[in-house]
Amino acid sequence: MMKFTIEDIKTEHQKVKSGADFPRYIKAIKNLGVSHYTTYVENGNTEYFDNNNQSAHTGDKYEKLTVAEKVNFENFKTRLKLHQQGGTDYMTFCKDCAENGIDGWVMNLEAMICTYFDRDGKEILVEQIPG
């Protein structure tokens, strides 16, 4: 039996106004029992996993974005930094990811790392999640 529901996660996510609120959100969903999650840029679907590898997903969150085939690493890093500093909202960040060839990311709440990947599932950038 999973400890958390998508509703629980949505409740926490609504408290996030910008990238600056992100560490608090991570702590909250970790406390709910989320061990890791994967977000897909194309449609916003996010799949949340617990320690027993059971999962729940949100389904499509917005109209499909086309993820570029070629990764523009430098531009992605610039847009990511802007987002983390609170300069863009989530939807803008997702569009930035798509334009720069980022297909999604995996958030590992145990190791506290975030791995961005391209359309081939190749790791593009691995970052420490601020605690």
Image (cartoon, rainbow, N blue to C red):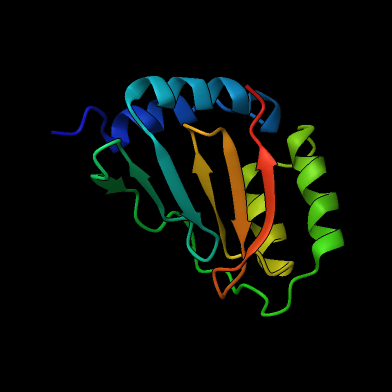
Residue ID at (52%, 25%): 25
**Residue farthest toward the bottom in the current orientation of the protein:** 69
Left or right: 76 as drawn, with respect to 16:
right
**How many numbered discs?**
0
Residue 1 location, quadrant: top left
Left or right: 101 as drawn, with respect to 13:
right
Residue ID at (56%, 19%): 24
Q: Position of residue 102 (x, y in %)?
A: 65, 64
Q: Position of residue 22 (x, y in %)?
A: 61, 28
Left or right: 52 as drawn, with respect to 66:
left
Left or right: 32 as drawn, with respect to 92:
left
Residue ID at (27%, 46%): 55
Could you say which is closer to the camera, residue 82 or residue 54? 54
Q: Position of residue 30 (x, y in %)?
A: 42, 25
Residue ID at (72%, 68%): 99
Where is the C terminus found, in terms of image quarters? top right
Could you say which is closer to the camera, residue 35 or residue 5? 35
**Residue farthest toward the left in the current orientation of the protein:** 1
Q: Position of residue 56 (x, y in %)?
A: 27, 46
Could you say which is closer to the camera, residue 127 or residue 14? 127
